Amino acid sequence: MHITIRQLQVFDSVARNLSYTRAAEELHLTQPAVSMQIKQLEGSVGLPLFEQIGKKIFLTQAGEAMLGHARNIMQNLSAAADEMDDLKGVDSGRLKVAIASTVNYFATQLLAVFSREHPTVEISLDVTNRELLLSRLEANIPDLALMGKPPADLDLVAEPFMDNPLIMVAPPDHSLAQKKNIHLADLQDEDFVVREPGSGTRVAMERFFSEQDFVYRKGMELMGNEAVKQGVEAGLGLAIVSVHTVEQELTLRRLVKLDVLGLPIMRRWYVAHRRGKRLSATARAFREFVMKAGSNAR
Ligand code: PGA
């Protein structure tokens, strides 16, 4: 079998996403390039790895078996690279960080400071919502992730480093903008602009509303924090967002925080990695840096 590591990476991405298009996006390749790599791999293996039923693709039995081997090979390679980086020391390593989209509002500053202190470290940053971030961790792609509280069923080591209060925002001319102690019952006739499914912010908002027995009226569903903020500014409805995403809008009074009883929802940001993952010296240094930056921000 003549197989390249690149083919295995492409295969892993298509198998995780069950889509050539999404794999192409993830790997910054064109879709024909992805199909070509899979065809070549299937040629070397001598069996089809995917089958198409209707519009969906599925792994064949050979595909399932091959995927296990592909992941072992990639994990061994990445462990070898980490061990070599470790021997070279903090400053010669690479660092793969995955962050939840909401973390992006302060993570880039953190990375900028870290990168000034360690200018030779090669950093790659992957920004996605919570659900995609969890699938990246499951596939053992990032060294470290900055995210909301991880679920217990994924075997992660996670430590909180900063508070993440979620607040409700409205346009400044909203009728409740000046009101104190707003009850959720006062918001029955309001539309809520919400994040896409897969967003941790959305999960936390829906959990809060259901704990309070409040059935919210869903307005528009928008992709990402920027779209939600613009939706609220444009008068499409109210929204629950992380305070980190709206600092500027609150200062410039493009949005106001509503004084709703029970809010803020107090969440925390965590720095996480797969249990059993051998963190390189660079990853350990970044982890310590994040923990310290978090305690300074308190
Ligand atoms: P998200 O944030 O809403 O951008 O997915 C992650 C989280 O709050 O857990």
Image (cartoon, rainbow, N blue to C red):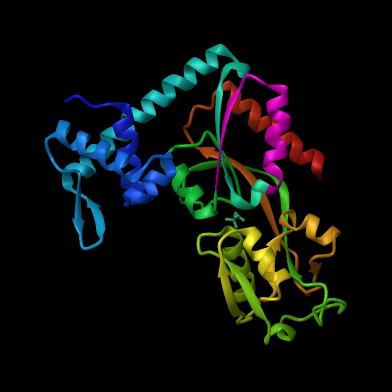
**Is residue 240 shown to the viewer in this render?**
yes
In this picture, is 116 found above or below 215?
A: above
Question: In the drawing, does residue 68 fall left or right of residue 133?
Answer: left
Q: Position of residue 166 (x, y in %)?
A: 71, 62
In this picture, is 215 found above or below 49?
A: below
Q: Residue at x 88, y 77 (%)?
A: 178
Rendered-image quadrant of the C terminus: top right
Q: Residue at x 79, y 60 (%)?
A: 249
Residue 109 belongs to magenta span: yes
In this picture, is 30 found above or below 276?
A: below
Q: Residue at x 83, y 76 (%)?
A: 177
Q: Position of residue 13 (x, y in %)?
A: 36, 42
The residue positioned farthest toward the top in the image shown: 88
- Identify the image quadrant of residue 9: top left
Magenta residues span 105-127
Rendered-image quadrant of the N terminus: top left
- Identify the image quadrant of residue 292: top right
**Is residue 148 shown to the viewer in this render?**
no
Q: Position of residue 67 (x, y in %)?
A: 27, 39
